[in-house]
Structures are given as structure tokens and as C-alpha cells.
Image: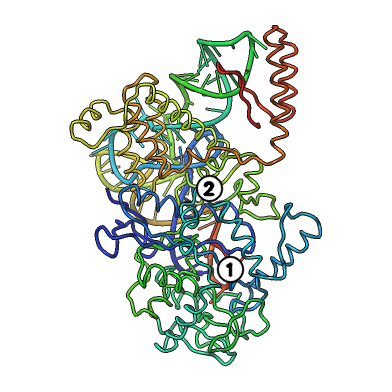
RNA sequence: GGCCGAGUACCCAAGUGGCCUAAGGGGACGGAUUGCAAAUCCGUUAUUCGCGGGUUCAAAUCCCGCCUCGGCCUCCA
């Protein structure tokens, strides 16, 4: 089975085969977060779709070398001056942290030097990795044993300087009269191929955000910065062009080449990365390495709306994943809500949608428990490798196992997650408790979940405060059970109402009463 | 102005020329179950695909026009 994926560069759906040859790993680079604040659900939609792609490639047997950067350098606040002006976002984050500290809003035990940009980046990078692992981002889980797969640009400045030197030597970059080094877009005729923003189109567009004074020193208005000398900047390094900092397109070109090679298979990011970021990366990488292409396939996830509107702090519809964890929503439900809409369509994140996903995952978990119970009761081992064993298992193939091919095929078809979910649901409805195929079905379900990544993540992250609650709830449930045994239903219902007022919903089952936060 | 997407039931969403009188989930409604609930399980829930034309034996799917929404055009996932 082969994975087909829409390539932004060619605008067509293409089969993914390792560039290095059959059986070789797929080299996959994802643009990761910039760590001057907590990542929000929109960021995670893009990261999780990259994760689904990676897991789908693995499902069909590819080895995937996946790298995701954690950007801690080079982002400016001032959008009217794209050539490196404005304030460093780390400096702004430091001020914000300082204010939060004064207001007593930082979590207990947080000690951070808000004047040190590296400490700020480290603080948010750590929080990002926590969030990412909760949501099952495989690259972040692997990072624990192999830290280099999530590189930090601040530790790769040498590679960036080398790249700039190569570009200058090759005639693709120049130092302007303001001291900054710029990429010469006229030296790269394919500029604009990815985004459609060809130099011709850019000129017609006559962007109003271009600052005339800065444009004056450049050979072409679209030339972009590679190195900015600035002895007063909060994060700066020595370079042949003076102490300063690198342009923000440089990091991915340098780190992808360092960790994956000059040409890679797939490069991903959010749709807003298409231009200018990825367009500029292509120009830099191809020019520096004298190669035809930088990445064979470009994978872009469209933006997320929240409750039908563009996400914005001022609208009150801005969520970080931590906000949602705090509401008692499980990581699995958030993960599913963020990946169930096709990656090439804008999705609309809603709290209702998260609840839908929660119920969906709960149901799959129940099916899995049932299969596990039934399989262990039957004592039937998972099918072994021998031909005889396998044919015996085939005779007994259950609804989930027989849906597996279709499920995988849906994912291979440009990551049709919604269709795959539909196939799984139909199969779940046909699972019965008395079946001799439980072990086979269970194995198939677990394989499906190796892509969905939700079944082992369906537990709410509880806080310290929650433990007090559970002690109270348990005490009330004992009282209620006593009342019910005495057929004092008025009292038992009163206790149930009291629990409901505490935000606790209860279920009477054959094994006793269970509860959860409503 | 340039480039790129999208409009399918109350909500989310699959379907890109005939197997579509349109998957799947949520909700709602009906049934089973329950002391009553909740949860669970079963069933019902779009003759119709933004609007108007056209092509075709056949259109949600192709073509033309229109309307609406979203993204990018040097902060951004």
C-alpha cells in the first residue's frame, strides 16, 4: 500500500516514495513552534497533522526520520518592518513573565529569570514538550531519548553562518550598505514557485507593509534578510558581518541539511508558512547546495477557526491545550478534534466538537476493553507466524480485522482521517462479546490506534486540587449507597443532586457506582 | 489588485460522473435496561448537496456565471 499526499509545490496528489531509494528512510522536517509563549490549539493542529502523516507512513512500513525544530531565535514583533526591526519576541515574553510574576500569576514553584532570553525559551520549550507528549506527538516522545531530533536554532548558529557564507560565495547573497546580509531573489529564477508569489506578482501586489527606507538598500524589494548586525540585540552572536542575529528563514535550511541532508522527502508547516518562510527556505537551500529541489513534497495544514471565528485573544476564543486540559478534557479528545477534519480544509474547533470526540474515544476504549476481556477469557493467543496458524486465524477474522485494509487505504488516500474513522465505527458496531476473533480484532484495533493515537491517552490530567474532590465524592457515594440499600431513595437522590452541584456525574453500574467530572 | 482554498441535515463531516432515493459521529426522537436517573445497547432522523444556467443516457461530483466564507501577498501553525 502506498501513501498519496497533496504536494503544495505541484498542487497535485503524489505517491510518497523515499527519495533515497526503496527501503530507505523518509526524511521529514516539520516547522515547529516558536517558544516565546505556550503553543495554542492552532499550532497543534499543524503539528498533529504532521504526526498523523508520520504514523501513516510507518503503518505502511516506511521508516521515518522526523525532525521538528523548536525556534528560540530571530522573531521580531514589528510587522511593518520585515527586515529585522522591531523588538525580539523573547524580550516581550520576558516582560510579560515579569508582570505575571508580580501579579502572582505564575504557577507555584516556577523560578525563571525573565531577563534571560535563553531561560524564557527553555521555560516555554519545556512546556511545549509536555503538551506535545500528552497529545501523542511522536517526535516529542522520541526526543526524550534522542534530543537532537528537536533542534534549537540558538545552538546551530555556526551552521547558519556557514550557509550565509556559501550563499555569498555563490553570488546569491550580498551585504548591503546598512550592514545586513540579504538574499538576492533575482539570482533564483524559481522564486515564487511554491506560493504563486512570483516576483512579477509581488510587484503588482504592491504590498503596503513594505517600508521604503529599508527597501532602499536592497537590490530587489523581495530580497530577504540572512544576517542582521545589531550590537544591542538581546540575543546576538559574532559573525563575519558583525555581532548580530540570523534571519528567521535560515534556521530550517541549516538544520534540515545538518540532520537530514541537502534534499529531503517531506517538509511540513501551517499554511501561513508557505509564504514567505518556505519560499525563502527553498531559495536558500537550493542555491547553497546547488540542488534542483530542497524538499520533494510540501505538506501544509490549513488554519483553524474557533467557534466559527478566527482565533484571537480579544474574542475570548483563544485556547492553549493547557486551558483545555484544565477543563478536564482528555488529551485524546483534543487530539481527535484537531485531526478529524481534513488537513487541506479550514477546520472549526468548538467545545461541542471536543465533547463529540470525547464520546467517540470513550466508545472505542469500551470496544477495546471488551475485546481484551473476551480475548483473555478465550485464552486465544494472537496469531503466530506459521502458515497453518495464520489460515486458522483467517477463518476467524472479526469485523475490525476485516476493516483494517479499508482503514489503512483511507489514510493512504491523502490522509482521509474522517473516512477512516467512519470505517472503524461501522466495524465497532459489528463487534459482539461472544466471538472467537477477539484477539485478532484487538490486534487490528491497536494497529489502527498506532495512527489515531488516542486509546492510551483518554485520561484527564488531574491536578492536586482534584484529589481533595475525589475524597469528598467517595464519602458521599458511601452515604448514598447506604441510603439506596435501605430503599431511602429520597436521600439517595438528594446526594446525587449534591454531587451534580459539585460538577460530578455518577453512573450506577453492576460493579458499583463510578463518577466523572461533568 | 495578485495567488490559493471552502460552501453537503440542527452541529461536525465523508463522498470528486452511474453501486448516492448521500458514510460515520454528535444531537433530537422512539425502544431495551434502571427504584428513578445517568451511562450503555438497538432503531428512526437529507428524494437532496450555496444560487442560477449548461454539458451528459446519467451530476453533490464536469463547464460557465453569481453569492457567501476563510487563508497568504514579508509577525503567524
Please state the chain letter of the residue tagged with numbered disc 1 in the rendered image.
A
Mark seen at residue A72: 1
Residue drawn at the location 39% of the way across and 37% of the way down: A446
- How far from the left and from the top, in percent, is residue A269? 48, 61
Q: Secondary structure at mark 1?
A: loop
Depth check, front residue: A31 or A126: A126
Colouring used for the render: rainbow
Q: Earlier in the sequence, mark 2 or mark 1?
A: 1
Query: Which residue does the numbered mark 2 point to in the structure image?
Result: A135
Q: Secondary structure at mark 2?
A: loop
Residue drawn at the location 70% of the way across and 30% of the way down: A503
A106 lies left or right of A271: right
Please state the chain letter of the residue tagged with numbered disc 2 in the rendered image.
A
Residue drawn at the location 41% of the way across and 32% of the way down: A425
- How far from the left and from the top, in percent, is residue A184? 46, 84
Distance (Cα) linking label 2 and label 1: 22 Å
Q: Are marks 2 and 1 on the same chain?
A: yes
- How far from the left and from the top, in percent, is residue A283? 42, 76
A411 lies left or right of A366: left
From what the image shows, is residue A181 above or below residue A271? below
Residue drawn at the location 50% of the way across and 66% of the way down: A151
Pointer 1 local density, CA inside 10 Å: few below 14, some 14–19, many at least 20 = many
From what the image shows, is residue A110 above or below residue A353? below
- How far from the left and from the top, in percent, is residue B70? 56, 55
Q: Quadrant of residue A368?
A: top left
Amino acid at each position: 500500500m502506498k501513501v498519496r499526499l497533496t504536494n503544495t509545490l505541484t498542487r497535485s496528489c503524489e505517491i510518497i516514495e523515499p527519495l533515497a531509494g526503496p527501503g530507505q528512510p523518509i526524511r521529514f522536517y516539520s516547522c515547529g513552534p516558536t517558544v516565546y509563549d505556550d503553543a495554542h490549539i492552532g499550532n497543534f493542529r499543524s503539528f498533529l497533522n504532521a504526526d498523523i502523516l508520520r504514523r501513516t507512513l510507518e503503518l505502511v512500513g516506511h521508516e521515518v526520520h522526523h525532525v521538528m525544530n523548536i525556534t528560540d531565535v530571530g522573531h521580531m514583533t514589528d510587522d511593518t518592518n520585515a527586515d529585522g526591526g522591531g523588538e525580539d519576541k523573547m524580550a516581550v515574553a520576558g516582560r510579560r513573565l515579569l508582570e505575571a510574576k508580580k501579579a502572582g500569576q505564575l504557577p507555584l514553584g516556577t523560578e525563571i529569570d525573565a531577563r534571560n532570553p535563553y531561560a524564557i525559551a527553555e521555560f516555554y520549550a519545556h512546556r511545549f514538550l509536555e503538551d506535545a507528549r500528552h497529545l501523542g506527538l511522536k517526535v516529542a516522545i522520541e526526543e526524550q531519548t534522542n534530543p537532537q531530533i528537536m533542534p534549537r536554532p540558538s545552538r546551530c548558529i555556526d551552521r547558519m553562518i556557514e550557509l550565509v557564507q556559501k550563499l555569498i560565495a555563490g553570488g546569491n547573497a550580498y551585504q548591503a550598505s546598512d550592514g545586513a546580509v540579504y538574499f538576492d531573489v533575482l539570482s533564483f529564477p524559481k522564486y515564487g514557485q511554491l506560493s504563486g508569489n512570483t516576483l512579477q506578482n509581488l510587484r503588482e501586489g504592491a504590498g503596503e507593509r513594505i517600508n521604503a527606507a529599508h527597501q532602499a538598500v536592497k537590490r530587489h524589494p523581495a530580497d530577504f534578510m540572512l544576517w542582521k548586525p545589531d550590537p544591542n540585540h538581546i540575543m546576538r552572536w559574532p559573525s563575519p558581518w558583525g555581532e548580530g542575529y540570523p534571519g528567521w528563514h535560515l534556521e530550517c535550511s541549516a538544520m534540515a541539511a545538518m540532520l537530514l541532508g541537502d534534499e529531503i522527502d517531506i517538509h511540513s508547516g501551517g499554511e501561513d508558512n508557505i509564504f514567505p518562510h518556505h519560499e525563502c527556505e527553498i531559495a536558500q537551500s537550493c542555491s547553497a547546495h546547488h540542488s534542483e529541489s530542497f524538499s520533494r513534497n510540501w505538506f501544509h495544514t490549513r488554519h483553524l477557526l474557533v467557534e466559527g471565528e478566527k482565533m484571537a485573544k480579544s474574542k475570548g476564543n483563544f485556547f492553549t491545550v493547557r486551558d483545555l486540559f484544565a477543563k478536564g478534557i482528555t488529551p485524546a479528545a483534543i487530539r481527535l478534534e484537531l485531526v478529524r477534519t481534513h488537513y487541506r480544509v479550514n477546520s472549526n474547533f468548538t467545545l461541542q466538537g471536543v465533547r463529540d470526540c470525547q464520546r467517540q474515544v470513550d466508545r472505542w476504549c469500551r470496544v477495546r476493553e471488551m475485546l481484551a476481556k473476551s480475548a483473555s477469557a478465550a485464552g486465544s493467543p494472537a496469531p503466530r507466524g506459521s502458515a497453518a496458524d495464520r489460515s486458522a486465524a483467517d477463518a476467524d477474522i472479526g469485523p475490525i480485522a476485516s476493516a483494517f485494509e479499508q482503514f489503512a487505504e483511507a489514510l493512504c488516500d491523502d490522509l482521509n482521517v474522517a473516512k477512516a474513522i467512519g470505517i472503524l465505527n461501522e466495524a465497532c458496531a459489528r463487534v459482539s462479546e461472544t466471538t472467537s476473533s477477539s484477539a485478532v480484532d484487538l490486534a487490528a484495533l491497536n494497529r489502527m490506534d498506532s495512527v489515531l493515537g488516542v486509546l492510551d491517552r483518554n485520561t484527564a490530567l488531574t491536578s492536586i486540587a482534584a484529589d481533595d474532590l475525589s475524597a469528598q465524592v467517595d464519602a458521599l457515594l458511601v452515604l448514598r449507597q447506604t441510603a439506596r440499600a435501605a430503599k431511602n431513595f429520597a436521600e439517595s437522590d438528594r446526594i446525587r443532586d449534591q454531587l451534580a452541584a459539585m460538577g460530578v456525574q455518577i453512573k450506577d453500574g453492576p460493579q458499583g457506582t463510578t463518577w466523572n467530572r461533568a
